[in-house]
Amino acid sequence: MRYESVAAAALLISVLDAQPLQVFSEFRRVGPDGAIVEQDRPGRAREIISPAVARDGFASFRLAVSPPPGKPFVLHIGENPEAILQITMYRELPVKAGGRWIPDKLERVSLPVTGYVPLPASGQPETKALTYWMDVWVPAHTPPRRIRVEAQLNIGDDWIIYPMEFRVLAATIPKPVLATGALPPVTASSAETAFGPLQSFLCGKNEKASSNGPSMREMIRRNASQDLALARQLEPAIGRLTIEAAIAKIVEAPDIKTWCEARAGGMPPKLDPEVYLKVRDYLMRSSLK
């Protein structure tokens, strides 16, 4: 579907009873009930409007689709200019953990995505939302610029458009050293998956390699590995102590030594899970100086 035709169709948007299309960061998992899972709920969800992305790296977002039960939908991603970003979509598959259904596994799907929310079955919990992981690759040769990206949802005669403006920065991700080790359990906060590699970098914690299979947690850890590649690149220019002091302030710790000791004691982050995005923002901004 061409961007121009969808832009015209946006005039036909009607307001449905619920929000049929929402976009979240990678740290806000949405359950089949349509609500952010309890572990990822603290704080206020970041509004995804104009995300900054670095070149030669991935950026990930979560789309929640909540059409009327049994009513088919079509989900597409529009891009203007076209064919600059490489976008891959995955359907998020929930697993039962801690007595709740939490999305974790990923199944690749093709664009446009078609589907429907199943009608309630006897004795089964009602499904109100289907969720998708949008993985965006920014090629290394992409010049710094702004790219309009739209999540476009069609339900019957209705079009629901979620516009975003991706800001491609001059920052380029160095080749990352992918973090390894056992992933946090599904029942942990999404931020725990990113804080693990950060802890290894800041505290010298060694992790044993393990294979966990494709999941959102693997993707979050991959993205965190990119952030640490930027951090290592910055060290000679701004100094390790400067990086540590800035991150300590973000995570509300008096210093990194105190934070590392708390982490070693098994203390999970009790902050808004999206506080990790402030670490990423800091590293990308610093790489531009």
Image (spheres, grey):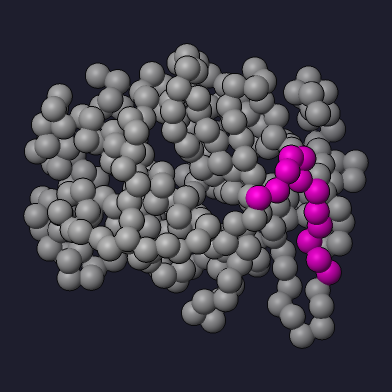
Q: Position of residue 214 (x, y in %)?
A: 53, 57
Q: In this view of the protein, which residue sits in the foreground, 181 or 60?
A: 181
Q: In this view of the protein, which residue sits in the foreground, 81 or 162?
A: 81
Any part of residue 9 in sight: yes
Is residue 112 highlighted in magenta? yes
Examine the rendered structure and indicate whether residue 6 appears above or below residue 145. Answer: below
- At x 55%, y 68%, the residue is 102
In the image, 92: left or right of 118?
A: left
Q: Position of residue 78 (x, y in %)?
A: 70, 29
Q: Position of residue 187 (x, y in %)?
A: 45, 71
Q: Position of residue 57 (x, y in %)?
A: 44, 33
How many marks can you see?
0
Q: Quadrant of the C terminus?
A: top left
Q: Magenta stretch?
A: 108-119
- At x 24%, y 36%, the residue is 231
Q: In this view of the protein, which residue sits in the foreground, 18 or 118?
A: 118
In the image, farthest residue toward the bottom: 123
Examine the rendered structure and indicate whether residue 131 appears above or below residue 233. Answer: below
- At x 53%, y 38%, the residue is 48
Is residue 277 highlighted in magenta? no
Q: Quadrant of the N terminus?
A: top right
In the image, 287: left or right of 257?
A: right
In the image, farthest residue toward the right: 157
Q: In this view of the protein, which residue sits in the foreground, 138 or 99?
A: 138
Quadrant of res 210: bottom left
- At x 47%, y 37%, the residue is 58
Any part of residue 254 in sight: no
In the image, 54: left or right of 201?
A: right
